Amino acid sequence: MDPVTLADIKLYNFVKSDSRDSEITQFLPTAIKKVEDYTGRALIDQEFDIWYDAEEFKQMMGNNFAYLSTLNVTSIESISSFSIDGTETIIDDTTYRLQNNQAKFDVTIPSGSTRAQDAYKISVRAGYGADDTEVPATLKTAIAYMIKHYLSFKGNVSTEPTNHIPNMVKEFMTPYTSTMKWFN
């Protein structure tokens, strides 16, 4: 499911006929990806794995939390530790929880080696919601304006500057951009 519908795009851009539907549909995935990449957040719920080497993870654990805000995390599905030989151990889910978009841990430091080759995987669900009704209207507007920018290009579609984000669109997205803060 897309975070914005064809009907929404047409409404935002005052398109009444169906003559440009194929163009809008063609540009929609690019515009969505630009918004997600710029904000650093998934718009529709998705599952992600966040990997840390053991040393980095344990430094964060000194504060009993890991920042996960770059993905707009809604839930932690699991946390696993991997030993040097690749053996996976799932950490008991009673020892961690999500609070203020941070993984909070009720244990000071997970057991295991501190070698940098070791790794921890945090599997999370991230996004604004399960469907387009949960996506902030401002981000839907940003997608619509990206498509308007693409549709107004008067050149060959293969040379369309889809890597450019107009300043007005950046202004819509800026309040939703995430800043990564790893340590307190």
Image (tube, rainbow, N blue to C red):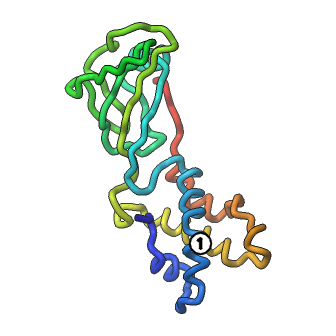
Q: Is residue 107 left or right of residue 69?
A: left
Q: As displayed, is residue 64 above or below residue 164?
A: above
Q: Is residue 75 left or right of residue 58?
A: left
Q: Amino acid at mark 1?
A: Gln
Residue 10: x and y in percent read 52, 81
Q: Is residue 165 left or right of residue 12?
A: right
Which corner quadrant of the image does residue 86 belong to? top left
Residue located at (35% from left, 66% from top)? 133
Residue located at (59% from left, 51% from top)? 38
Q: As displayed, is residue 56 above or below residue 37?
A: above
Helix, strand or loop at label 1? It is helix
Residue located at (44% from left, 39% from top)? 69
Front in this rendered view, residue 10 or 79: 79
Front in this rendered view, residue 136 or 52: 52
Residue 135: x and y in percent read 40, 61
Residue located at (56% from left, 57% from top)? 33
Q: Is residue 127 left or right of residue 56?
A: left
Q: Which residue is mark 1?
A: 26
